[in-house]
Image: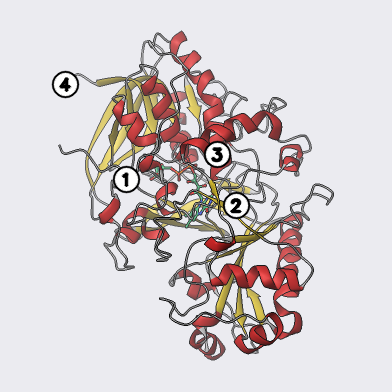
Amino acid sequence: MTAIEKTDVLIVGSGFGGSIAAYHLAAGGAKVTVLERGPWLSGKDFDHDYLLGSSYTKVFDFVAGDGMSVLGGNCVGGGSVVYFAALPRAPKYVFERHGSIGRRMWPASISRKTLDPWYDRVSEVLPVTQQDWNDVTYAGGLWAAACDHSGHTANPVPVGVDAKKCTNCNWMMAGCRFDAKKSLLMNYLPAAMEHGAEIRPLHEVQKLSRTEDGGYRVHYNHIDEEDYRITTGSGQIEAKIVILAAGAGATPPILQRSEDTLGAMPHAVGRYFSGNGERLNTAIINEERVAEVLGLQRPNGKAYEANQIGKGPVVACWDFVDSALPEYERFSMEQLYFPPGLGTILAQAPGATGPSWFGKEKKEILKQWKSWLTIFLMTEDDNEGVFGPPPPTGNAYRISQQMLARGPLSYDPTPNTRRGWELADAKVKEILEKDGLAKVMPWTNDVVGAYTVHPLSSCRIGDDPATSALDDRHELRGHPGIFVTDGSAVPCGITVNPALTIAALAERAIPGIVKAARERGVDVTYGAPLPKSISTSVARPAA
Ligand SMILES: Cc1cc2nc3c(=O)[nH]c(=O)nc-3n(C[C@H](O)[C@H](O)[C@H](O)COP(=O)(O)OP(=O)(O)OC[C@H]3O[C@@H](n4cnc5c(N)ncnc54)[C@H](O)[C@@H]3O)c2cc1C
């Protein structure tokens, strides 16, 4: 019989929740193994292309559910490789939300004040910088000027991007070829590797079982690097501590599939999913009116002609991120660029008399593509997403060799969620249609339901065992030694981009995880200095 491999701490997924845990536990002296389902790409591997087989299709995971589709990262570094790196902190009121759960959704021990020191740590490591108006693209300036024209404020967002290296090339979602985006490949992950953490790409975890000594056995499949539908092998690793950080769309199926071997899961596993109340609106800008009313014109000689091409989100209006407003009426409005493909399909023709997302009138607005401006809304939803039975492997039924899949998530938006969307849609319309600046329409939900790039809450922390799968130390109730540190732990939608909050919560969870590891016999300490950010994304070590 072949001996089963052993490690101290097994981490599933290498995004924010996984990388932060990997660094601290490895730096503290534990043997750390990270299993990551996606490939390991870095620097020059990132293509400026949307073709099948480019980095874009390799590092993305688009999972269509019933009423909600989730877009996420599928690679070493997780969402940090594909994301736009807008990194605001959650507003204070978020921590007091009750939603439809009927009680404070966050554990009593967490507020904005108690989370701030953890935000500070992540902000120093990534690092997060505040953009100023000189960093803002034409599209961001246009959004800011339109907000101002309507009596609203708008400001540049804090980001994890090195402005000196950014070429404004617009290919953030395919991975940053210039290492301007400070993904996890440039901070926590290389620092974890320096301390001996082993990161294994193309290893998809399927389920957990128990070992006789109170630890866990992690079962994985090895995935083909071109066709993710093909399994090229499988294996098991035993660990004293398991940290699940596969993302809010993938952690629940792993735990649900493990029920046969681990025993019953807390009720909240795979329930209370939040899509962060997301919504996109496309405005078709009337260039002449913008020149007349706002006095703006795109400068000549710019590399790109289209309004929306450039960086990710640069300017946001936070006037409705306001604790004085009632729950479900608070939202943020962020200008961002979304590349062709899904965005082009889901955009609707404003004022269409026929079909709005396809057909003749859609064809007309496609011709005006250079004048599109996309506004991203993050509202308060009702944690109404539920995961059905897990697929036979992974988090979804793979449809194509890369990128596309169909998953078990269903989402039926409540009247609260719908009203939040309506209010936010109406505000964008009011701002951008004032004095004929633009015509605005939200993206359709008819094709893939609602959509989110910020999946959250499918395995929540909380104080109430009935509605939270994890206690406030992120330990899975009834399964000591299993922790969850990804977006699924965040209790609810937060009305702003969540990566910094996911990361701050992961930082906060580490001392408790180290303590649990010590109690399970792992020789590990907490307190290593924060990792330094490096200038080149770390490549896969040669075999
Ligand atoms: C296009 C886009 C733009 C975004 N822009 C922003 C932004 O500007 N600001 C912001 O705050 N957030 C942004 N986000 C969201 C942000 O990327 C996520 O909130 C964040 O990465 C979530 O962190 P996580 O730790 O929960 O999971 P992830 O970062 O998603 O990491 C999970 C990892 O686990 C891996 N995995 C999944 N299943 C398995 C398995 N079975 N076995 C092994 N590994 C597995 C995945 O491949 C992935 O690498 C964006 C996301 C997208 C898609």
Residue 414 visible in image: yes
Q: Nearer the viewer, residue 392 or 372?
A: 372
Q: Which residue position is annotated with label 4?
A: 2
The residue carrying mark 1 is 537
Q: Is residue 281 above or below residue 507?
A: below
Mark 3–mark 1 CB contact (< 8 Å): no
How far apart are labels 3 and 4 at the CA level?
38 Å
Q: What residue is pinned by disc 2?
A: 275
Residue 445 visible in the picture: no
Please name which of the two marks, 2 or 1, marks the residue nearer to the observer: 1
Mark 4–mark 1 distance (CA, rounded to whole Å): 36 Å
Q: Nearer the viewer, mark 3 or mark 4?
A: 3
* 3 or 2: tag closer to the N-terminus: 2
- For disc 3, does the CB lie below 8 Å from ligand 1? yes
Q: Secondary structure at mark 3?
A: helix
Q: Give SS at disc 4.
A: loop
Which residue is pictured at 59% across the width and 28% down the height? 470
**Is 478 left or right of 529, judged from the image as shown?**
right
Sequence-first tag of 2 and 1: 2
Quadrant where the N terminus is found in the figure = top left
Residue 435 locus on image (x, y percent): 75, 84
Q: On the image, numbered disc 3 is attached to which residue?
A: 502
Position of 79 relative to 301 (above/below): above
Count of number-bearing discs: 4
- Percent across and percent down for residue 83 are 46, 53
> Could you tell me which secondary element the residue under label 2 belongs to?
loop
Question: What residue do we see at 40% from left, 50% from top?
Answer: 81
Q: CA distance from mark 2 to mark 1?
A: 29 Å
What is the three-letter code of the residue carrying label 1?
A: Ser
